[in-house]
Image (cartoon, grey):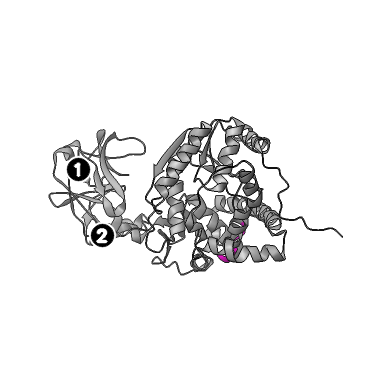
Amino acid sequence: MASLPNNKSDHQLNADYLLQQLGKLAKEKNIKTWCLAYSGGVDSQVLLHLLHLTKLNVSAVYIDHGLQAQSSDWARHCEAQCKNLNIPFQLIKVNAAAAKGESPEAAARTARYAAFKELIQKSDCLLTAQHQDDQSETIFLQLLRGAGAAGLAGMPEIATFSNGWHARPLLDISQNVILDYANQNALSWVEDPSNQQVNYDRNYLRHSVMPQLQQRWPALNKTLSVFSQQQAENAELLEVLAEKDLSSSLLEDTCLDINQLNKIENARLRNVLRFWFKNLQKPIPSRAVLEQIVQQINNTSHDSHVLINWANVEVRRFRDKLFCLKKISHDASQVYNWNVKNELELLTLDKKLKLEKCETSDDIKFVLNESLLTQDVTVRFRQGGEKIKPAGRNGSHDLKSLFQESSVPTWQRDRIPLLFVEGELVAVVGYWIADNFSVKGEGVLPDLI
């Protein structure tokens, strides 16, 4: 009878093994420099020692989260270790304070990786020391969160990161093998006391759950490693399908055609929505929120007041279009006195308004008279009842009618800046300019950036 493999790694952990791993990546991804995320713990300490033996172009970075009283001592330890191995060292301090509702682990991770993103450039690769046991914990955490194939695939061995790459060369190595290497080579490392605090989900799994599971199923880590690879393949196939569905329904980066979406079944619909949010670098919503979005897509009432939100994201429907937007809290009662020679910051829109010189063309029929540059300009937002005589059209029109005619979504209408001169509406930014302020040829136009 065939037996399941045990948890012991099939690989010998040495410089040759690491060089083989990284050499393959360097050739495939054109990687020339390696940056180690170095905490001083045993895992990154072992990886530092191995990198030193490979003679690759390596540097090490210690991120001080400022969460532990010993963090400065750990930084000095890391600097001394790098100096002994002749590896360039850098210390970066970050603010890892958790926001309301955010876990300390998530806040620290976000701050850490934001710092690394600033460092990693083209042909660079960030190295982190996650191992096979870490992968098992990650898969369990994702399972408990109700993740799909992409989450259950765990951590990838190589992925794009910032302008370069992020690799985890120890994912196939168990922590026991790493500890054996550290002891055999008399390495010195730091111990973070927070790693023993079982109030953190990962630590609870590591200390209270995984040991019992491994005692009953010794091949657990190996089995989960195979499982994660299978899920990665499933996730890849789902992305291929999502790309096909998205290409047929994408009107703009943040807008989908609901008529096209209604041609696919709900399982594929959820899949393409997840892919869309991922491409927009938005957090993936829960299945319950996804179901709400699907219901609105299937809804034939064309309700323009639909709003579904999570995290900092809002999804809205207008007629047969679905929009994914950044959540903002906009005060339409604001009034700005604008010196048009400078950019105007519209804080609640998270945008800036500027006046640019331009001239008419096939695409631009009219521009504003440059005399606007010497006028006192007031910027307001729609309150109701505003009228304008658009350049090239007969008679004055109220903005409500113009917005309806141009299919401007209802929620965008009070977010569009309006320019006034001496109480007269001069321009609706991005849409219309007043006839008596318009010219042909050279002039200026407002631009929202």
**Residue tagged 2:** 331
Q: How many marks?
A: 2
Residue kind at label 2, given as amino acid type:
Asp
Residue at point 67% right, 42% down? 13
**Residue 172 versus residue 23 in the image, above or below:** below
Mark 2 is surrounded, within 10 Å at the Cα level, by few (under 14), some (14 to 19) or many (20 or more) other residues, namely: few
Quadrant that contains the N terminus = bottom right
SS under mark 2: loop
**Residue tagged 1:** 437
Magenta stretch containing residue 147, yes or no?
yes
Comparing 143 with 107, the one in front is: 107
Label of residue 96 in the image: none
Q: Which residues are magenta?
A: 143-149
Residue 153 in sight:
no
N-terminal label among 1 and 2: 2
Question: Distance between the Cα atoms at labels 1 and 2?
Answer: 28 Å
Residue kind at label 1, given as amino acid type:
Phe
Magenta stretch containing residue 317, yes or no?
no
Residue at point 48% right, 41% down? 162
Mark 1 is surrounded, within 10 Å at the Cα level, by few (under 14), some (14 to 19) or many (20 or more) other residues, namely: some
Foreground mark, 1 or 2, reads 2
Residue 31 in sight:
yes
Image position, residue 93 (x, y; %): 38, 45
Comparing 225 with 206, the one in front is: 206
Residue 302 lies left or right of residue 266; in this view the side is left
Comparing 409 with 434, the one in front is: 409
Quadrant that contains the C terminus = top left
Image position, residue 121 (x, y; %): 48, 35
